Amino acid sequence: MRLKGDKVWLRALEPDDLAFVHRVENDEGMWAFGNTRTPFSRFVIRQYLENAHQDLHTAKQLRLAICLPDRFEAIGLIDLYDYDPVHNRAGVGIIVDEPARQKGVGTEAMALLAGYAFHTLNLHQLYAHIDPVNEASIGLFTTFGFRQCGHRKEWNLVDGAYRDELIYQLIKH
């Protein structure tokens, strides 16, 4: 199975993931690293989960739960977004629960997703938009082989101040 490693396995989202996804999407501390500025209701998250089965070509997004090898409960989420089948690329986003961080979980999840993206989906490149203060993400992506290819000055307004955004890219060779 391509989406299973030694430390984690990646699976499709399930209706039982409602509480976890609701908590992650409503974590205001994470809003600075994305484009979310408003909370999501359980109703909206439930609707999202009901449609999470949509094909990548239709939804242009694939979100997977990150789980420990012997568990079904999610400890994180990883996704491909803005999937572009014409140019064979997609953005990557990842979040891992605090207790599971710094244990290689994110690195292995990224390796599994990249392997799936490059070999199964035949993507040519993956990219990520990262806030310069998010050192954990920068560390994860660079450790895996992503390289900074862009720097947008004062790109995102966060808590009344403009912050830069870095663009990282991994090209299949």
Image (cartoon, rainbow, N blue to C red):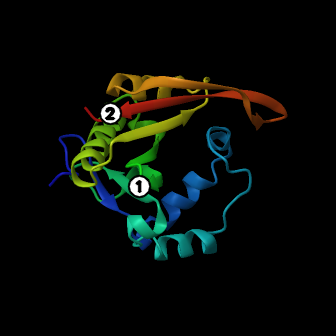
Q: Residue placed at 41% from the left, 59% from the top? A: 62
Q: Residue placed at 31% from the left, 31% from the top? A: 104
Q: Which mark is residue 107?
A: 2
Crowd class of label 1 (few under 14; some 14 to 19; many from 20; radius 10 Å): few
Q: Secondary structure at mark 1?
A: loop
* Residue type marked 2: Thr
Q: Residue placed at 33% from the left, 42% from the top? A: 124
Quote the CA–CA distance across marks 2 and 1. 28 Å
* Residue type marked 1: Val
Image location (x, y in percent) of residue 125: 37, 40
Q: Which mark is residue 86?
A: 1
Q: Nearer the viewer, residue 99 or 104?
A: 104
Quadrant hosting residue 53: bottom left
The extreme right residue here reads: 160
Q: Residue placed at 28% from the left, 54% from the top? A: 121
Image location (x, y in percent) of residue 93: 47, 44
